[in-house]
Image (tube, rainbow, N blue to C red):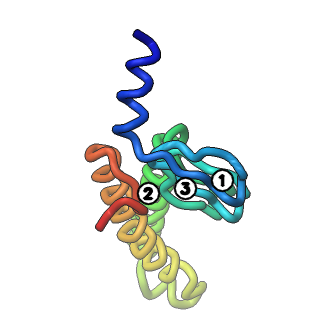
Amino acid sequence: MIDSFSLNVWGLVQWRYCMKCRAIRPPRAHHCSSCARCVLRMDHHCPWVGNCVGLLNHKFFLNFVLHATIGCTIVMVTMTHYIHSIGVKKLMRISNHYLAVPIVCCALILSLGGLFGFHSYLILNNLSTLEID
């Protein structure tokens, strides 16, 4: 029974050979040139994390992006409250950097929030960025 099951499965699955790893590559696996290995359901190689985002660590990457978004939101709210409490006229005499921080945080919130939404969509639909058409 095991032999007939494996023959049926072997015909349904498209098996590939990775020339760089010199091994049979499972379905939905891709070779990462930065890590020099094949990764299951590879999404991308993330320089922030320093690793490939794939099947086993996609949820950790999503958690990282969520917490980075929350951190930027906290900084923006805190700085906006600080600017409001000091007053803009008094702030102009101190430094313009206090005004730049909320603007940069707002840009990071929009970009990281979009990245979080996109990767949430990918996880819910069991896809990776390499599999999107």
Residue at 69 percent across and 52 percent down: it is: 37
Which residue has dot 3 on it?
30
Quarter in which the N terminus is drawn: top left
Residue 77 picture quarter: bottom left
Could you tell me how far apart the alpha carbons at marks 3 and 1 are, in whole angstroms? 14 Å
Per the image, the residue denoted by label 1 is: 51
Q: Callout 3, which amino acid?
A: His
The three-letter amino acid code for the residue at tag 1 is Asn
For image coordinates 29% across by 68% down, the residue present is 133
Which dot, 3 or 2, sits closer to the camera? 3
Q: Position of residue 50 (x, y in %)?
A: 68, 57
- Disc 2 residue type (three-letter): Thr
Q: Name the residue located 61 percent from the left edge and 57 percent from the top edge.
A: 31
Disc on the earlier residue, 3 or 1:
3
Secondary element at image label 2:
helix
Between discs 1 and 2, the one toward the N terminus: 1
Q: Secondary structure at mark 3?
A: strand
Q: CA distance from mark 1 to mark 2?
A: 20 Å
Is 70 in front, or is 120? Answer: 120
- What numbered label is drawn on residue 69? 2
